[in-house]
Image: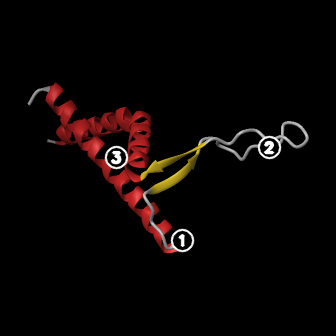
Amino acid sequence: MTTNKIQKQLEKKSKKEIDDLVTNLVWDIRRFKQENTGNEGRGIDWYINHTKPTAMYAGETMPDPWDFLNWDDLRRLFRRNLEEAMLDRMVEQKANELIKKMELL
């Protein structure tokens, strides 16, 4: 097996791990919503700002944009961001672990 094939296999495995995590996370959110509101619904309202907006001037507030994300949208959002943030490092770590195992042989 070539190095490139090994790299692709490690990346495929890492993407599967992220996908499994995201699937379970969204399922847990759906179940939590159902158990605590009595309605699973088609998705969830998602606020864009990281913090609650505060008044800029007397009587005015900053906009707090939100959007409705269906469950598939939420999965894609989580998966994309987690892959972007962690995939390369996950593959690198798996490659290092594989090299260590090979050195033991």
Residue at mark 1:
37
Query: Residue 38's x, y, as percent?
Result: 50, 73
Residue 104: image location, x then y, percent: 19, 42
Circles 1 and 3 in contact, beta carbons < 8 Å: no
In the drawing, does residue 50 fall left or right of residue 19? right
For marks 3 and 2, give the CA distance.
35 Å
Asked which quadrant contains residue 12, the reply is top left
Q: Secondary structure at mark 2?
A: loop
Q: Amino acid at mark 3?
A: Ile
Label drawn at residue 18: 3
User: For mark 2, does the 10 Å Cα neighbourhood hold few (<14), some (14 to 19), or many (20 or more) residues?
Assistant: few
Q: Position of residue 6 (x, y in %)?
A: 17, 33
Q: Nearer the viewer, residue 34 or 105?
A: 34
In the visual, does 33 lie left or right of 84? right
Q: Secondary structure at mark 3?
A: helix
Q: Residue at x 34, y 46 (%)?
A: 18
Q: Can you tell which quarter of the image residue 93 is in?
A: top left
What quarter of the picture does the N terminus occupy? top left
Quadrant location, the C terminus: top left
- Mark on residue 73? none
The answer to whether residue 5 is above or below residue 90 is: above
Of pointers 1 and 3, the one earlier in the residue sequence: 3
Residue with the mark numbered 2: 54
| Label 1 CA crowd tier, 10 Å (few <14, some 14–19, many 20+) | few
Q: Nearer the viewer, residue 90 or 61?
A: 61
Tell me which residue sits at (49%, 66%) in the image.
33
Tell me how far mark 1 sits from mark 3, CA to CA. Answer: 28 Å
